[in-house]
Image (cartoon, rainbow, N blue to C red):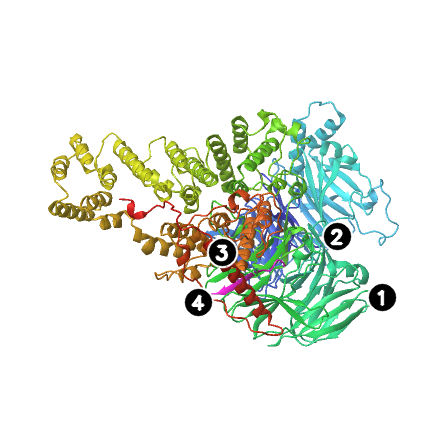
Amino acid sequence: MLDLVRAFPGSPGSACCLHTLCLPTESLLLYPSADTVVILDATSLRFLRALAFSQVFPGASANRNITSLAIDPALKLVAAASGPRLAVWSLSGVSARTWLVHSSLLLPNDKHITAVDCSSGLLVVATESTLSVHTLVMENDLPTWSSKWSCRSYLPVHFSPSLAYVATVSEQAKIIRIILTTSGRQIQAIPHLRPVTSVIWRSTQASSRDGLVLYTVTSDATLRIFTPVLDSPQHMQLHATLDISSATASKLPTSPTDHPASSVFYLNREIVTQTLTTVLSGASDKDDAKIRRVQDIRDAGWDMFMQVLPDGSLSIRANIDRRPPTLLKRFTLLQNVPFTFLRAPSHLHVVPGLTKHTLALVSTTPLSVHMLEPLNFFDSRSDGLTLLGRVHDYTTDGEPRIKQFVRTPDGTGLAIVRETGGDAWIVRDHGTSLQRAGKWTTADNVVVLNGGKFYMMWGRSFATFSNATYLLTLHTTPELTLSLPPISSLFSLPSRNSAPYECIYAITADLAPTIFHIHAMSGGLPSLSVISQTALPLPSPVAFILPVDPMGWISSRDTAGMERDVLLSVGRDGELMFWVPDGNGTGWRRTGRLRTGRTSIRMARCSSAKKTVLIVPRADGEEELTIWDSKKSEFSSGLEYAKILGSSEHVNDLDWSSTPDNQSILAVGFAYRVEILCQQRMTYFDEGPGWGVIKSIDIENLLPHPISDSIWLAHGTLLIGSGHQMCLYGLPRQLEKRETEEGLFELPSSDVAAVSLWDKLDLVKEILVHLSRESLPQKKSRLKSSHRVSPPAVFVSVNGLEETDEPEDQGFSRPLIERLLDHLEATPLPHLTPNEHAHLLVLIRAVLEVDESRRALDANGLRYLISMRSFYILNQRASAPSSPESRGAVSRRSGWRARLRFRDIIWAFHSETQGLLLSASLAACQGKMTWSDARALGVFLWLNSVESMRSHMELIARTEYMAGDARDPVACSLFYFALGKHKLVHGLWRQAAWHKEQAVMIKFLSNDFAQPRWRTAALKNAYALLGKRRFEYAAAFFILSGNLKDAVNVCLLLRDILNETTIPLAFKKGNRWLGSWAFWLLHRRDLAVRILVTPLQDVAGALDIPITEFGNPHYDDPSLALLFSQLKSKTLQTAKGTSEISGRTEFNFVLQMARVFTRMGCHALALDLVRSWSFDRPSLVTHDPTQHFAPPSPTTARRLHALEQAMRRRSSIVIDIDPFTVPPTRRPSPKPREVTEPPAQLMKETINEGDLVARKAGLGSLLKTAKQDVQVPEFDMSSFI
């Protein structure tokens, strides 16, 4: 996913304060940039984080830059000064990213800090007029700085290693003054002929803590070594001088102006010695010349200096410390080849390398890091110094803060609008780097042109508009200007490859906005001209007009010739309208509209796929984020996602991007994080939101300032701006390469589930065989090149699966599937969520078990059996103690369900092999089905045979009685009483000698309940048991009393419950499966079909009972189309219901189901659905199955292919109504008036009405041919008891 690939924290200047801090596990590089302290990894130059001065002083001016920086390596402190303020941070633990505010120091407002140094709790601060030393003390457990003394100011300032002295530079930087830390008294002044550029105290030896050795470097790159006088240790004298004339291995410039001045740098002896010791400890050949040389350097304790010469070569000079000072030696250790450095660096530090055997040299400018391998380096080999990285950060210190990003339509060009001015950039290196292309000083609106191509032609690639001058300026040579009224938006559209101009659109800030179409000509002489001045034909005033984000126009495949929306208008009433320019460019044409019902919209953005995100404030301070699809129909309101954001989650910016297959991706920017949302694949398992957060980029521990803007760039990279700094996020190179490799066809678990439900079990088996061949290691090398079949091609084949000559052991079998399951358990498939992967494993095992026990089941029976096996396997996985999801307890959120869903139960309800399903259900319960098992499987909801119900009820009663060791008659009384076997219960009570209620129950059940007296007694006992909350036992006594209504009210099994509870509940929950089942039982089978397709409000209007609550319509299950195709011509009632549905509605319904298939990742099934759906009317005529038909449409019929078994027209139809007494269901269509050219809307209504007339005519023909003497046995709820 998106990772930080490049940071732009600001580059260190030539005169910057560059510091290093060595930690046990890593080395840090620190330098100031504007009002922040930038922290990098010293060995890789990787950005770690930035510390803001405002974190310590929130009320300080944000425009004050940090002027001084110091590091306390002992206490791990960072001190930064700006004006009269000093901020100090401390490292928490050993992590380089966790820094805490430590303390602060505030001087009088007229004292501006010019230099600072910090060491072991001592702080020296220099201002323009004073020099002071402070000590760290604790007051009330808070660290504070206490002043010791102050004197006249000198700078810069440097503590000696013993902290006894401070070295300062004064008098035009030519005099070094040594001052006592304890009193502030000056003990020596050391004059120099040239300005001093660097002062270095050498680390003291352990045997001589107070020994002083001072190195100074002057502006002519000359190093001077000062050592103490023998009889006066506090007084220092010049011991040696190393200047550029002593380097003879490289030719020097003849004039000081020929090359930049060289420089001299001290290589920290402690760091070098530690690395050399590690190298020597691992050396095997002690007599090797390279080993001896490194050992001499380590043992002699040499001080080494690196001198970078003007030609880029370097020289190492050594100084050997001896006592007395007259024995000090200096010589050239090695001379390297030229062009090692691009130019002489201004700063150079040595830090531990990536390994314990290497060193790293960090230099600037530019900021670079070299790996130094000691054995080869000190042997003067070319591979001893290797460049690891170089950062060309085109941002400079003191850049104004970022306000906004503006990009080109394809994301290859970028404009950064700052608080003052701005700059244009070009996106390079596959989106991983940016290069500055130009700057401007003032502008209110900016547009970047053609991804930087204009930059190659004209030298600039942007145009700006200023509200102060009302001029649109094209930054060419010379600049071109165009006068415009005040505008609110300025943007460009993708230009055609052959077009010699760039299209710029400007929208005015009026209440009735005017849109200027401008051409910026690049061919020949540059020009800037207005092509047209138009306005949108809006029916009412709008809140604002926005350009549609064109990122998807470039990345989408197969988009040639497609019409693209250009503008989005957002009405004050929440109505969205989409607009494109008309053919001649003189106006605008509306392509769609969507009523959202939202008002007071604060922000809106529209993607190239017509996905619109809205931010709407709420009264309680919260905000609502909604995402809408413009493809609104009677089956979809357009709302795809809604989320309520807390009052602290204020959305700052929104930006769209697009994948190559035109999937929209949204970036939502908050104060310190950016959430990436994308469309979620719909599944058969969860009813999750249509969109989800796939990545949350949190910058709170990276950049200190709030996010000012974020924007998508080319190649799927995201740029985030904070303060004056930027971070670029993208795919890592290795992951990006892996994404482009050809791999196995994508196999979402929802694809397998959908295929299995759509009567394609053989195809599922074929898919699993291919999956095993591609996944199993032992099969992969042999079969991958020889057997490369694309399973999606089989989805749409007319004749189904092709015959293969594979050996039987390579086909679908238990050993193969068991090996596949074991492999997938250890190595999950990529691109699947953990939930999807778990469901894929469940479905694979369910398909295996169903295939082994399918026997003579019909298609609906197979669907129920697959759902049942998946239900048990998934619950078993979720509740297993070893399952990571269960954690020792059943977690319902991990996939565990209490019962099958109605959409699974209804397949068994319409199956003609219920006897086999009942046997399979018993086998799933190990032959002992309890009432909870029957309720979970919905057995008594789908059984149609009364005799089967009775026998199965008796089996459940026996199982409930035998459960456990107690043999409690209470557990089975309800079921036996319902079966009319209270004498059997009486016998069971005789055997329950252990039960405390035995005597009472034996006496009570011995009475004759045909007499009113004992029925009344049973009724009183039932109400008493209700008071004791023994509901099931109370229901048993209600049945015993003969009061079946009260008994059913407790058990929820009565017929009127369907009307009073079930149907209203189905409408309230939007559960069309439950509603279809209830209508079927009520013999309203016309409504059982209509509720699958027709809007719920329309169905409710045909009912005799009031329906007041309507839930989500839930047109997100393609199996609705499968059930509708089965029921629409099953009986005369269903044919009547089908005739109530217009052809246009059915056509839109099929398209909606295809879209849902696409959202599920089942594109092949979506194609199969639309190409094989039949719009046939119910008929009794038998057609030749070999006859070919035209492609399907709402008004023409065709034969079926993949769905033929499920949707074939029957040669006979069930007669479940009187054909000659069918009441009219709709008013007759009005006679059409004769008009010359009817309006389009009237023509549409006439077509729909004509479609209904045709349907009614077909139904009438069907009813006239039906025979009234056909007797069809039907299940009657009243015969249950």
Q: CB atoms at circles 1 and 2 under 8 Å apart?
A: no
- Check residue 619 in the rendering and tell me which mark sits there, or answer none: 4
Q: Earlier in the sequence, mark 3 or mark 4?
A: 4
What is the distance, in whole Å, between disc 4 and disc 1 at their CAs? 57 Å
- Check residue 1261 in the rendering and tell me which mark sits there, or answer none: 3
Which range is magenta?
608-617
614 magenta-colored:
yes
What is the distance, in whole Å, between disc 1 and disc 2 at their CAs? 62 Å
Q: CB atoms at circles 2 and 4 under 8 Å apart?
A: no
Q: Whole-percent x and y of residue 405?
A: 64, 61
Q: Whole-percent x and y of residue 1025?
A: 18, 46
Q: Earlier in the sequence, mark 3 or mark 2?
A: 2
Judge whether 914 appears above or below 498 on screen: above
Q: Kindly identify which residue carries mark 2.
A: 192
Q: CB atoms at circles 3 and 4 under 8 Å apart?
A: no
The nearer-to-camera label among 1 and 2 is 1
What is the distance, in whole Å, between disc 3 and disc 4 at their CAs? 59 Å
Q: Is residue 108 visible?
A: no
Q: Secondary structure at mark 2?
A: loop
Q: 150 or 477: which is nearer to us?
A: 477
Q: Identify residue type, mark 2.
A: His
Q: Kindly identify which residue carries mark 1.
A: 524
